[in-house]
Image: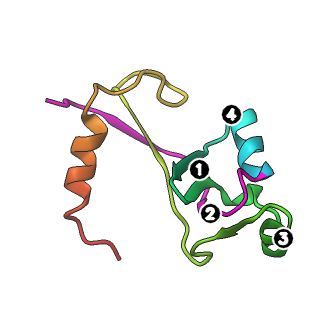
Amino acid sequence: QAGLACLEALPETIALLRLDRGVPDCVRDAARTGRFCAVVQEPGSAIAWVPRNLLPPPDELANQEGAEEVEPTIGWCAFRVGRTGSGKKGLKVPAVPGTAAALCAQLVDEAVG
């Protein structure tokens, strides 16, 4: 049983990138400075999520970094899931294991738009 949880929406719009030649500097910079970023590596492909305001211009991203934004007209968002009352300035304590999965299972059935 997951129990009660708080959601904190991260303030930045997130971009989804397709990576063709390693991890771009904007993703490395996000990780180094504690900003949100995530990279998923699979055989033959990789993607990353990074705040859009950290991206270089599209041609530089493609030519120098070997990456491209998958859907530039869509802004993704990220949520942090934590325990209720765990911090006045953002969530400090992680939620009970399984809370995010329970939340995602509920959200998948909701209509958006």
Start and end of the magenta stretch?
A: 1-24
Q: Which residue is mark 1?
A: 11
Query: Residue 99 in magenta?
Result: no
Query: Which mark, residue 63?
Result: 3
Q: Which residue is mark 2?
A: 17
Up/down of 59 relative to 30, above or below: below
Q: Amino acid at mark 1?
A: Pro
Residue 63: image x %, image y %?
Answer: 84, 70
Q: Is residue 24 left or right of residue 12?
A: right
Disc 1 and disc 2: Cα gap in Å? 19 Å
Residue at image point 40% right, 25% down: 94
Nearest-to-viewer mark from 1 and 2: 2
Nearest-to-viewer mark from 3 and 4: 3
Considering the numbered disc 4 on the image, is that residue within a helix, a strand or a loop? loop
Q: Amino acid at mark 3?
A: Asn
Q: In the rendered view of the protein, which quadrant contains the C terminus?
A: bottom left
Residue 41: image x %, image y %?
Answer: 54, 50
Q: Is residue 21 left or right of residue 99?
A: right
Considering the numbered disc 1 on the image, is that residue within a helix, a strand or a loop? loop
